[in-house]
Amino acid sequence: MIDAATTWQQACTALAGGDYDTAFGVLEAAMREARKPERARIALYLASVQSLYGDAATGEVAAALREARTLEPALREDPLYLALSAELDARTRGPDAAPPPEQVRAAADPLARYHALAALALAEQPQAALDVYLPLSELPEHLQWRLRSWQADSEEQLGHTQEAALLYAEAAHHAQGLNRAVMLQEQAALLLQLGQAEEARQVLAQARPLYLGHDLDEGLNLATWHYLQAQALLNLGKPDEALASIREADRLERAFGDPSYGVALVWGQVMTQLGQPEEALRHFERALTLATDADRPYAQHELGVALLDLDRPLEAREQLEAALADPEYPYQPEVLADLAECDYRLGRLQEAQQAAEQALAQGAVVPASLVLGSVALDYYHLDEALDHYERVVREAAPQSRDWITAHQMAADVMAQQGFRDPAAAYAHAQQALEYTPESDDWYGTLQDHLKKAEALMGEKSGRMLN
């Protein structure tokens, strides 16, 4: 006699080892031999396993649920049936789906609670998903990493990036093979969002050896690995290595699927850091053609900045205004600062100052302060200009382009003021000179400022400095 609970345990043992064929074989053989009530319950277990394939298996899940209720109409009220139905509904209708009833979220059956939690996460009800009580130990092994993944996704929906990253790390700990690599990559993506590029690179290093072959799933996920690696390297100031990674990401996408917006965008960012704005522009334009509605403002913003780098402020303004028109775009203060730069390039000093002040008030401190410094200099308000550049020095990432520019400008303003504070002028010039190539026009100017400041410091101390 076939027992549904025993059959499920056998299937779970196979699933724990990643042997889906054996799991399906066990369940399907039991379906052929079991009595009607047992077959109905096994059909629910089949639906549970099919649901692990996500959106690709909604038809199979629906068929298994249909068979379960046909064999045993009373199952329509069973918590597992209701939870699986809610998950299927959420996969097809998203936030419009009906959530699983409260009694299902608190059901005695942990498998029902798992699918209820998944349904809530898919229906964009992250807090409700996190409120489902479900200890890891109550679930079969093959669902433990998936539970942490759903919980991580819910924390991410709530904007809790650090908590989500930790949950993805735990999911990776419980997963194996390619699934572990994917969870590590999800963690790395969030670490990049948190500005932790070195930590992201270390997590990615753990994921890379888990790729063994080149089937479709591996190929596309490996493309994602290279895409994330390129971002980590770029943020660590290694654009040449980042270029190799983003090229490989593009190659794998084309070999196993289609080119993506994300890869095109990061490729453009790499070329920007390599000082090739024309090439960057080409990739940003491609990113814009590949972007979804939600991604468009990101591509428009990058494209606008690239056009500014090429001193094409009118075209840049068109792209930046389009990005600013999206109320959901999170970098609106930065767009305002870039629009202020457009106005400054076009000689509209009053408009530039107004937009930059608005951007500064909204938190875009570095780009807004650079524009305000330029406007103040044009009005020959040297003290005001110096205040803006020194703010950039304090707020910008050390050794970044903005940080170097601010040191250059601060040294130059102090020179125009007659080196009232030669030690400060010397410090600015020295910092800037360290990261300014000899081929740059600024190099000779900074050397002159350094020598004059050094001479004045020597006079004040009564001796010349070596």
Image (cartoon, rainbow, N blue to C red):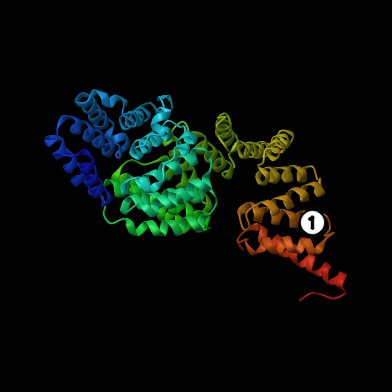
- Marks counted in the figure total 1
Location of mark 1 (residue)? 414
What amino acid is labelled 1 in the image?
A: Met
Residue at left offset 68%, top offset 42%: 368
Indicate whether 179 appears above or below 435. above
Q: Position of residue 109 (x, y in %)?
A: 34, 37
Residue at left offset 12%, top offset 35%: 32
Q: Quadrant of the C terminus?
A: bottom right
Q: Position of residue 392 (x, y in %)?
A: 69, 50
Q: Is residue 432 left or right of residue 55?
A: right
Q: Quadrant of the N terminus?
A: top left
Q: Residue furthest left?
A: 33
Q: Nearer the viewer, residue 337 or 122?
A: 122
Looking at the rendering, which quadrant does residue 58 occupy? top left
Residue at left offset 32%, top offset 53%: 176
Residue 98 appears in the figure: yes
Local secondary structure at mark 1: helix
Q: Is residue 211 left or right of residue 304?
A: left
Residue 250 appears in the figure: no
The crowding category of the residue bearing disc 1, from other C-alpha atoms within 10 Å (few below 14, some 14 to 19, many at least 20), is: many
Q: Is residue 258 left or right of residue 418?
A: left
Q: Nearer the viewer, residue 192 or 422?
A: 192
Q: Position of residue 262 (x, y in %)?
A: 43, 43
Residue at left offset 68%, top offset 51%: 395
Indicate whether 146 appears above or below 75. below
Q: Position of residue 277 (x, y in %)?
A: 52, 47
